[in-house]
Amino acid sequence: MNDLIRFVKQKSVTRVLVFLLLVFVLYLVRSMIDIILMTFIFSYLITRLENFILKRVSIYRPIIVIILYALIVVCLTLLLVKYVPIIIEQLNQLIKFGNAFFTTKSNNQIIDYIVKMGNDFNITKYTDKGFTFLLSSLKSTGTVMMNIFIALMLSLFFSLGREHLLVFTKQFETSKIAFIYEEMKFFGVKFVRTFGKVIEAQFLIALVNCVLTTIVLWFLHFPQLLTLSIMIFLLGLIPVAGVVLSLIPLSIVGFSIGGIKYIIYVIILIVVIHAIESYILNPKLMSAKTNLPVFYTFIILIFGEHFFGIWGLIVGIPVVMFFLDVLEVTGQEGKLGGNKKMT
Protein backbone atom coordinates (compact mmCIF):
# COMPACT_ATOMS: atom_id res chain seq x y z
CA MET A 1 0.00 0.00 0.00
CA ASN A 2 2.83 2.37 0.92
CA ASP A 3 4.52 1.57 -2.39
CA LEU A 4 1.31 2.50 -4.24
CA ILE A 5 1.05 5.81 -2.34
CA ARG A 6 4.69 6.64 -3.12
CA PHE A 7 4.09 5.76 -6.78
CA VAL A 8 1.02 8.00 -7.01
CA LYS A 9 2.87 10.89 -5.33
CA GLN A 10 5.53 10.92 -8.04
CA LYS A 11 5.40 14.16 -10.02
CA SER A 12 5.01 12.51 -13.41
CA VAL A 13 2.29 10.13 -12.20
CA THR A 14 0.36 12.97 -10.55
CA ARG A 15 0.59 15.02 -13.74
CA VAL A 16 -0.76 12.16 -15.86
CA LEU A 17 -3.62 11.48 -13.43
CA VAL A 18 -4.61 15.16 -13.30
CA PHE A 19 -4.48 15.33 -17.09
CA LEU A 20 -6.74 12.26 -17.37
CA LEU A 21 -9.11 13.90 -14.88
CA LEU A 22 -9.15 17.04 -17.03
CA VAL A 23 -9.87 14.99 -20.18
CA PHE A 24 -12.69 13.17 -18.36
CA VAL A 25 -14.27 16.47 -17.27
CA LEU A 26 -14.07 17.81 -20.82
CA TYR A 27 -15.70 14.61 -22.05
CA LEU A 28 -18.57 15.09 -19.62
CA VAL A 29 -19.15 18.66 -20.86
CA ARG A 30 -18.55 17.84 -24.54
CA SER A 31 -22.01 19.17 -25.45
CA MET A 32 -20.80 22.61 -24.32
CA ILE A 33 -17.43 22.47 -26.08
CA ASP A 34 -18.53 25.20 -28.54
CA ILE A 35 -19.11 27.64 -25.69
CA ILE A 36 -15.90 26.63 -23.91
CA LEU A 37 -13.73 27.11 -27.00
CA MET A 38 -15.40 30.38 -28.03
CA THR A 39 -15.10 31.73 -24.47
CA PHE A 40 -11.38 30.97 -24.42
CA ILE A 41 -10.81 32.42 -27.91
CA PHE A 42 -12.79 35.60 -27.17
CA SER A 43 -11.05 36.05 -23.80
CA TYR A 44 -7.59 35.48 -25.25
CA LEU A 45 -8.02 37.71 -28.30
CA ILE A 46 -9.68 40.53 -26.35
CA THR A 47 -6.96 40.37 -23.70
CA ARG A 48 -4.25 40.58 -26.36
CA LEU A 49 -6.06 43.48 -28.04
CA GLU A 50 -6.58 45.45 -24.85
CA ASN A 51 -2.92 44.96 -23.89
CA PHE A 52 -1.96 46.24 -27.36
CA ILE A 53 -4.11 49.34 -26.80
CA LEU A 54 -2.88 49.93 -23.24
CA LYS A 55 0.72 50.05 -24.47
CA ARG A 56 -0.21 53.03 -26.66
CA VAL A 57 -3.04 54.75 -24.79
CA SER A 58 -3.21 55.50 -21.09
CA ILE A 59 -6.82 54.76 -20.14
CA TYR A 60 -8.73 52.88 -17.46
CA ARG A 61 -8.64 49.21 -18.54
CA PRO A 62 -12.34 48.35 -17.90
CA ILE A 63 -13.33 51.22 -20.21
CA ILE A 64 -11.33 49.64 -23.04
CA VAL A 65 -12.93 46.26 -22.32
CA ILE A 66 -16.46 47.70 -22.40
CA ILE A 67 -15.77 49.61 -25.64
CA LEU A 68 -14.34 46.51 -27.34
CA TYR A 69 -17.27 44.32 -26.35
CA ALA A 70 -19.76 47.04 -27.35
CA LEU A 71 -18.17 47.11 -30.82
CA ILE A 72 -18.41 43.31 -31.06
CA VAL A 73 -22.11 43.39 -30.11
CA VAL A 74 -22.82 46.11 -32.68
CA CYS A 75 -21.02 44.16 -35.42
CA LEU A 76 -22.84 40.93 -34.58
CA THR A 77 -26.20 42.73 -34.53
CA LEU A 78 -25.52 44.26 -37.96
CA LEU A 79 -24.45 40.86 -39.27
CA LEU A 80 -27.58 39.18 -37.95
CA VAL A 81 -30.12 41.82 -38.96
CA LYS A 82 -28.69 43.25 -42.16
CA TYR A 83 -26.23 40.81 -43.70
CA VAL A 84 -27.55 37.30 -42.95
CA PRO A 85 -30.44 37.72 -45.44
CA ILE A 86 -27.95 39.00 -48.03
CA ILE A 87 -25.63 36.04 -47.38
CA ILE A 88 -28.53 33.59 -47.79
CA GLU A 89 -29.46 35.19 -51.11
CA GLN A 90 -25.85 35.14 -52.31
CA LEU A 91 -25.52 31.49 -51.32
CA ASN A 92 -28.52 30.69 -53.49
CA GLN A 93 -26.83 32.47 -56.38
CA LEU A 94 -23.59 30.56 -55.76
CA ILE A 95 -25.56 27.31 -56.01
CA LYS A 96 -26.68 28.38 -59.47
CA PHE A 97 -23.08 29.22 -60.41
CA GLY A 98 -21.89 25.82 -59.20
CA ASN A 99 -24.60 23.89 -61.00
CA ALA A 100 -24.08 25.94 -64.18
CA PHE A 101 -20.39 25.03 -64.12
CA PHE A 102 -21.20 21.29 -64.16
CA THR A 103 -24.10 21.48 -66.61
CA THR A 104 -22.85 23.95 -69.26
CA LYS A 105 -20.70 22.65 -72.10
CA SER A 106 -17.62 24.79 -72.88
CA ASN A 107 -15.20 24.94 -75.79
CA ASN A 108 -12.26 23.90 -73.62
CA GLN A 109 -11.37 20.19 -73.54
CA ILE A 110 -9.75 20.38 -70.09
CA ILE A 111 -12.79 22.06 -68.56
CA ASP A 112 -15.10 19.60 -70.31
CA TYR A 113 -13.06 16.71 -68.91
CA ILE A 114 -13.27 18.16 -65.38
CA VAL A 115 -17.02 18.67 -65.79
CA LYS A 116 -17.41 15.10 -67.08
CA MET A 117 -15.56 13.75 -64.02
CA GLY A 118 -17.73 15.87 -61.76
CA ASN A 119 -20.89 14.60 -63.42
CA ASP A 120 -19.65 10.99 -63.22
CA PHE A 121 -19.34 11.45 -59.46
CA ASN A 122 -22.67 13.31 -59.42
CA ILE A 123 -20.93 16.17 -57.70
CA THR A 124 -23.89 18.52 -58.07
CA LYS A 125 -25.73 16.30 -55.60
CA TYR A 126 -23.02 16.94 -53.01
CA THR A 127 -22.81 20.67 -53.73
CA ASP A 128 -26.58 20.94 -53.34
CA LYS A 129 -26.38 19.07 -50.05
CA GLY A 130 -23.50 21.21 -48.84
CA PHE A 131 -25.20 24.49 -49.69
CA THR A 132 -28.49 23.22 -48.27
CA PHE A 133 -26.65 22.49 -45.03
CA LEU A 134 -25.14 25.99 -45.04
CA LEU A 135 -28.51 27.57 -45.71
CA SER A 136 -30.19 25.59 -42.93
CA SER A 137 -27.35 26.56 -40.59
CA LEU A 138 -27.78 30.24 -41.45
CA LYS A 139 -31.54 30.04 -41.05
CA SER A 140 -31.14 28.43 -37.61
CA THR A 141 -28.78 31.10 -36.36
CA GLY A 142 -30.68 31.31 -33.07
CA THR A 143 -28.69 28.52 -31.41
CA VAL A 144 -25.39 29.74 -32.82
CA MET A 145 -26.04 33.33 -31.73
CA MET A 146 -27.07 32.15 -28.27
CA ASN A 147 -23.79 30.22 -27.90
CA ILE A 148 -21.85 33.26 -29.10
CA PHE A 149 -23.78 35.49 -26.68
CA ILE A 150 -23.04 33.20 -23.72
CA ALA A 151 -19.36 32.97 -24.69
CA LEU A 152 -19.15 36.76 -25.03
CA MET A 153 -20.78 37.29 -21.64
CA LEU A 154 -18.44 34.80 -19.96
CA SER A 155 -15.38 36.36 -21.60
CA LEU A 156 -16.65 39.84 -20.63
CA PHE A 157 -16.98 38.80 -16.98
CA PHE A 158 -13.50 37.27 -17.18
CA SER A 159 -11.98 40.43 -18.67
CA LEU A 160 -13.68 42.81 -16.21
CA GLY A 161 -12.92 40.72 -13.12
CA ARG A 162 -9.60 39.18 -14.14
CA GLU A 163 -7.56 40.56 -11.21
CA HIS A 164 -10.06 39.34 -8.61
CA LEU A 165 -10.40 36.02 -10.43
CA LEU A 166 -6.63 35.44 -10.36
CA VAL A 167 -6.40 36.37 -6.67
CA PHE A 168 -9.27 34.04 -5.79
CA THR A 169 -7.86 31.17 -7.85
CA LYS A 170 -4.44 31.58 -6.24
CA GLN A 171 -5.97 30.58 -2.89
CA PHE A 172 -6.02 26.98 -4.12
CA GLU A 173 -2.20 26.95 -3.76
CA THR A 174 -2.61 26.48 -0.01
CA SER A 175 -5.71 24.27 -0.11
CA LYS A 176 -5.96 20.51 0.36
CA ILE A 177 -6.04 20.05 -3.41
CA ALA A 178 -2.93 22.17 -4.00
CA PHE A 179 -1.30 19.34 -5.98
CA ILE A 180 -4.21 19.38 -8.44
CA TYR A 181 -4.03 23.17 -8.68
CA GLU A 182 -0.31 23.10 -9.47
CA GLU A 183 -0.80 20.62 -12.30
CA MET A 184 -3.81 22.51 -13.64
CA LYS A 185 -1.70 25.67 -13.57
CA PHE A 186 1.05 23.88 -15.49
CA PHE A 187 -1.38 22.74 -18.21
CA GLY A 188 -3.11 26.13 -18.24
CA VAL A 189 0.11 28.06 -18.86
CA LYS A 190 1.14 25.62 -21.59
CA PHE A 191 -2.31 25.81 -23.19
CA VAL A 192 -2.40 29.61 -23.28
CA ARG A 193 1.16 29.85 -24.57
CA THR A 194 0.73 27.31 -27.39
CA PHE A 195 -2.95 26.97 -28.27
CA GLY A 196 -3.70 30.66 -27.72
CA LYS A 197 -0.64 31.87 -29.60
CA VAL A 198 -1.30 29.68 -32.65
CA ILE A 199 -5.02 30.62 -32.71
CA GLU A 200 -4.12 34.31 -32.51
CA ALA A 201 -1.62 34.02 -35.35
CA GLN A 202 -4.02 32.00 -37.52
CA PHE A 203 -6.81 34.52 -36.88
CA LEU A 204 -4.58 37.40 -38.01
CA ILE A 205 -3.35 35.43 -41.03
CA ALA A 206 -6.95 34.61 -42.03
CA LEU A 207 -7.93 38.27 -41.67
CA VAL A 208 -5.02 39.51 -43.81
CA ASN A 209 -5.63 36.82 -46.44
CA CYS A 210 -9.33 37.69 -46.53
CA VAL A 211 -8.68 41.41 -47.02
CA LEU A 212 -6.07 40.90 -49.75
CA THR A 213 -8.15 38.31 -51.61
CA THR A 214 -11.34 40.38 -51.37
CA ILE A 215 -9.58 43.44 -52.81
CA VAL A 216 -8.38 41.41 -55.83
CA LEU A 217 -11.81 39.81 -56.31
CA TRP A 218 -13.39 43.27 -56.22
CA PHE A 219 -11.07 44.44 -59.00
CA LEU A 220 -12.03 41.31 -60.99
CA HIS A 221 -15.75 42.14 -60.47
CA PHE A 222 -16.60 38.86 -58.74
CA PRO A 223 -20.26 38.61 -57.69
CA GLN A 224 -21.49 37.70 -54.16
CA LEU A 225 -18.39 39.33 -52.70
CA LEU A 226 -19.69 39.40 -49.12
CA THR A 227 -20.34 35.66 -49.05
CA LEU A 228 -17.03 34.90 -50.74
CA SER A 229 -15.18 37.10 -48.23
CA ILE A 230 -16.74 35.30 -45.26
CA MET A 231 -15.95 31.93 -46.87
CA ILE A 232 -12.30 32.97 -47.47
CA PHE A 233 -11.94 34.15 -43.86
CA LEU A 234 -13.43 30.95 -42.41
CA LEU A 235 -11.29 28.75 -44.66
CA GLY A 236 -8.28 30.88 -43.71
CA LEU A 237 -8.74 29.72 -40.11
CA ILE A 238 -7.77 26.23 -41.29
CA PRO A 239 -3.95 26.09 -41.18
CA VAL A 240 -2.13 25.42 -44.48
CA ALA A 241 -5.08 23.81 -46.28
CA GLY A 242 -7.57 26.70 -45.99
CA VAL A 243 -6.06 28.88 -48.72
CA VAL A 244 -5.83 25.92 -51.10
CA LEU A 245 -9.41 24.82 -50.38
CA SER A 246 -10.71 28.27 -51.35
CA LEU A 247 -9.34 27.63 -54.85
CA ILE A 248 -12.26 25.30 -55.73
CA PRO A 249 -15.27 27.63 -55.19
CA LEU A 250 -13.36 30.66 -56.48
CA SER A 251 -12.43 28.79 -59.66
CA ILE A 252 -16.05 27.76 -60.25
CA VAL A 253 -17.31 31.33 -59.81
CA GLY A 254 -14.42 32.68 -61.89
CA PHE A 255 -15.15 30.30 -64.77
CA SER A 256 -18.84 31.18 -64.64
CA ILE A 257 -18.17 34.90 -65.09
CA GLY A 258 -14.98 34.97 -67.20
CA GLY A 259 -14.09 31.54 -68.49
CA ILE A 260 -10.66 29.89 -68.36
CA LYS A 261 -8.93 33.27 -68.11
CA TYR A 262 -10.48 33.92 -64.70
CA ILE A 263 -9.49 30.46 -63.48
CA ILE A 264 -5.87 31.37 -64.30
CA TYR A 265 -6.33 34.66 -62.41
CA VAL A 266 -7.69 32.76 -59.39
CA ILE A 267 -4.80 30.24 -59.44
CA ILE A 268 -2.25 33.09 -59.59
CA LEU A 269 -4.08 34.86 -56.74
CA ILE A 270 -4.10 31.74 -54.52
CA VAL A 271 -0.40 31.05 -55.25
CA VAL A 272 0.52 34.64 -54.34
CA ILE A 273 -1.63 34.62 -51.17
CA HIS A 274 -0.18 31.24 -50.15
CA ALA A 275 3.34 32.59 -50.71
CA ILE A 276 2.56 35.67 -48.59
CA GLU A 277 1.19 33.44 -45.85
CA SER A 278 4.10 30.98 -45.93
CA TYR A 279 7.04 33.38 -46.28
CA ILE A 280 5.82 36.63 -44.69
CA LEU A 281 2.82 36.18 -42.38
CA ASN A 282 3.76 32.88 -40.73
CA PRO A 283 7.33 33.90 -39.78
CA LYS A 284 6.15 37.40 -38.78
CA LEU A 285 3.04 36.51 -36.79
CA MET A 286 3.88 33.03 -35.55
CA SER A 287 6.72 33.14 -33.11
CA ALA A 288 5.01 29.80 -32.39
CA LYS A 289 5.63 28.45 -35.87
CA THR A 290 4.48 24.85 -35.98
CA ASN A 291 7.35 23.35 -38.01
CA LEU A 292 5.11 20.34 -38.63
CA PRO A 293 5.69 18.43 -41.88
CA VAL A 294 2.89 18.98 -44.40
CA PHE A 295 2.02 15.27 -44.23
CA TYR A 296 1.44 15.46 -40.46
CA THR A 297 -0.53 18.68 -40.91
CA PHE A 298 -2.99 17.09 -43.33
CA ILE A 299 -3.27 13.93 -41.21
CA ILE A 300 -4.19 16.10 -38.21
CA LEU A 301 -6.74 18.04 -40.27
CA ILE A 302 -8.33 14.84 -41.65
CA PHE A 303 -8.64 13.13 -38.27
CA GLY A 304 -9.63 16.38 -36.56
CA GLU A 305 -12.51 16.92 -38.98
CA HIS A 306 -13.57 13.27 -38.69
CA PHE A 307 -13.79 13.26 -34.89
CA PHE A 308 -14.63 16.90 -34.07
CA GLY A 309 -16.14 18.36 -37.26
CA ILE A 310 -15.44 21.99 -38.13
CA TRP A 311 -13.77 22.64 -34.78
CA GLY A 312 -11.30 19.86 -35.54
CA LEU A 313 -10.12 21.72 -38.65
CA ILE A 314 -9.65 24.98 -36.75
CA VAL A 315 -8.18 23.81 -33.45
CA GLY A 316 -6.55 20.50 -34.51
CA ILE A 317 -3.10 22.00 -35.13
CA PRO A 318 -3.12 24.20 -31.97
CA VAL A 319 -4.14 21.21 -29.83
CA VAL A 320 -1.33 19.09 -31.29
CA MET A 321 1.12 21.93 -30.63
CA PHE A 322 -0.12 22.01 -27.02
CA PHE A 323 0.62 18.30 -26.63
CA LEU A 324 4.05 18.73 -28.23
CA ASP A 325 4.80 21.50 -25.76
CA VAL A 326 3.63 19.42 -22.78
CA LEU A 327 5.72 16.46 -23.95
CA GLU A 328 8.64 18.79 -24.81
CA VAL A 329 8.92 17.07 -28.18
CA THR A 330 10.14 20.06 -30.15
CA GLY A 331 11.45 22.38 -27.47
CA GLN A 332 8.65 24.93 -27.86
CA GLU A 333 9.58 26.78 -24.66
CA GLY A 334 11.58 29.53 -26.29
CA LYS A 335 9.62 29.69 -29.52
CA LEU A 336 6.23 30.16 -27.98
CA GLY A 337 6.85 33.33 -26.08
CA GLY A 338 8.98 32.15 -23.17
CA ASN A 339 7.14 32.47 -19.88
CA LYS A 340 4.50 34.90 -21.14
CA LYS A 341 1.07 34.44 -19.64
CA MET A 342 -2.32 35.84 -20.51
CA THR A 343 -2.50 38.80 -18.21
Image (cartoon, rainbow, N blue to C red):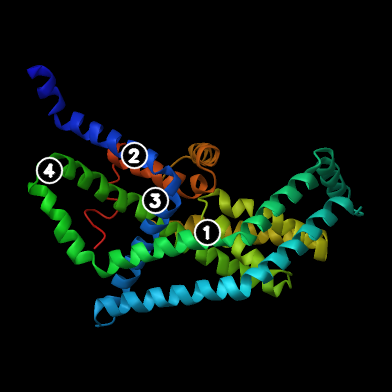
Q: Earlier in the sequence, mark 2 or mark 4?
A: 4
Q: Quadrant of residue 269?
A: bottom right
Cβ–Cβ below 8 Å for labels 1 and 2?
Answer: no
Residue closer to the observer: 75 or 295:
75
Identify which amino acid the numbered label 2 is placed on.
Answer: Leu
Mark 3 or mark 4, which is nearer to you?
A: 4
Q: Which residue is mark 3?
A: 289
Task: Tell me which residue sits at (34%, 37%) in the image.
Answer: 23
Residue at 45%, 52% (x, y): give it.
Answer: 34
Query: On the rendered image, what quadrant is the C terminus found in?
Result: bottom left
Where on the picture, by quarter, is residue 324? top left
**Label disc, if present, on residue 178 of the rendered structure:** 4
Q: Which of the two marks, 2 or 4, is nearer to us in this view?
A: 4
Q: CA distance from mark 3 to mark 1?
A: 31 Å
Give how far apart the Cα atoms at labels 4 and 1 are.
37 Å
- In the rendered structure, which disc, 3 or 2, sits on the residue that comes first in sequence? 3
Q: Is residue 93 above or below residue 293?
A: below
Locate residue 339, reporting x and y percent. Answer: 21, 54
Q: Position of residue 336 (x, y in %)?
A: 30, 52
